[in-house]
Image: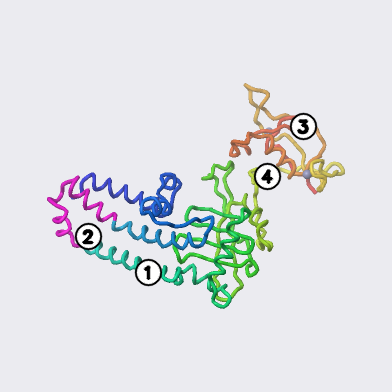
Amino acid sequence: MMGETSWMFCLFYIVFATGFLFQFQDFQNLGLSPENLLTNVFQLDLGSEQLQFLEFHLRKSCGALLLQTFLPIGFLVGFSYFHVHVDQQYPSIYAFWESNLPFQVSLALFLGLWLLVWVVAQYWTLNHFEHHPYVTKLKLYAQNGDWKSVMSDINTEFRRIDKFTICTNPIERVVVTDNWVIYLGAVPWKFHLAHQSDVTLSLIQSEHHNISTEGQTGGTQFLRIQVQNGKPNCESFSFRLNSVEYQNLQDKLTRQIQNIQNIQIFKTVSDRFVEVFKEAVAQNPKAPAEEELEACIGCMATEANVKLIRRCDTIDQENENTSCVNCYCRPMWCLNCLGKWFASRQNQQQPETWLGSKCPCPTCRSKFCVLDVALIES
Ligand SMILES: [Zn+2]
Ligand SMILES: [Zn+2]
Ligand SMILES: [Zn+2]
């Protein structure tokens, strides 16, 4: 029989282990990050990330792996403690372990695994980390086997303030320096290194999230960028980035990011809204072309192609000011400019309400809604 405290402990430990492995924001705020535990609790000297970027991550990756593989052992020991001392299901810890063969086997297996990881980590550190998976990748770029000079070149570039860092999630990081693209994953063997002259970057996927974890209004667009490494024996990899950072990434690269699928990149909430606005307007009935169309007075680049024709029946009896009214203006705007105008007149804090809101005509100020926008037949 499992007591209440034992259950509570299981739940707590699952949350704790997941939070620690995936480094949720709250865990970082509490100081439960591997680097913090290694330096402050275990008193290890990881060095300075800013000054010795790769050395810091070589040490940190070994330490983090040891901490992560210790999690199951911590669970078994903690569980036995709560089961015996708090729930009092057994007279002693010894009695608990003696009568639970699966627990004994699991503990032996996890201890064995942890020891194995410890031995491997020791092996990696030999000879200034010569056998570490990161160094294996560095060696591909070494001239005459001198991987240390590759490392010091990367460290030098990392110290410059204009490096570009992408942290889409807490356990993955991409650093773009003047010459290198470096990917640091959650485990030591998830490390990629590419020299900018060898790579082709392409935009392969886009996803929209309506709720943003970074508090961005109007949701977030994430782009997946594939880094194809032309150098022999170097793997290709991909990473995710917030679309608002796309331009910064492009600025830091010596080559153009390819966008073969023509994925639209939304830099602002307003950009995203204009797309939705256009789709909504396309569903409305069209207006016949009655006169010669002039250039749009907003952008002067395209012909004016929309007219406001009141089609909705939103007559608000209580408040006449909020009802749509007829507009008699001749077509002066293109759909794109009208969409931008519409977005600019809304409450910037609540983009989810925009499409259902109203907006004054840019010329005569008559109120209109999305239903009242008609494309002119061409
Ligand atoms: Zn225009
Ligand atoms: Zn008007
Ligand atoms: Zn209306």
Label 4, ligand 1: CB separation under 8 Å: no
In the displayed structure image, the side of residue 360 where residue 110 appears, left or right? left
Local crowd at mark 4 within 10 Å, few (<14), some, or many (≥20)? many
Residue at which label 1 appears: 120
Mark yes or no: residue 169 visible: yes
Residue at which label 4 appears: 274
Q: Amino acid at mark 3?
A: Cys
Residue at which label 3 appears: 327
Q: Position of residue 302 (x, y in %)?
A: 81, 48
Q: Which residues are magenta?
A: 74-101
Q: Are marks 1 and 2 in contact (CB under 8 Å)?
A: no
Local crowd at mark 3 within 10 Å, few (<14), some, or many (≥20)? some
Residue at which label 2 appears: 103
Q: Amino acid at mark 2?
A: Phe
Instruction: Indicate which disc, 1 or 3, sits on the residue closer to the N terminus.
Output: 1
Secondary structure type for disc 1: helix
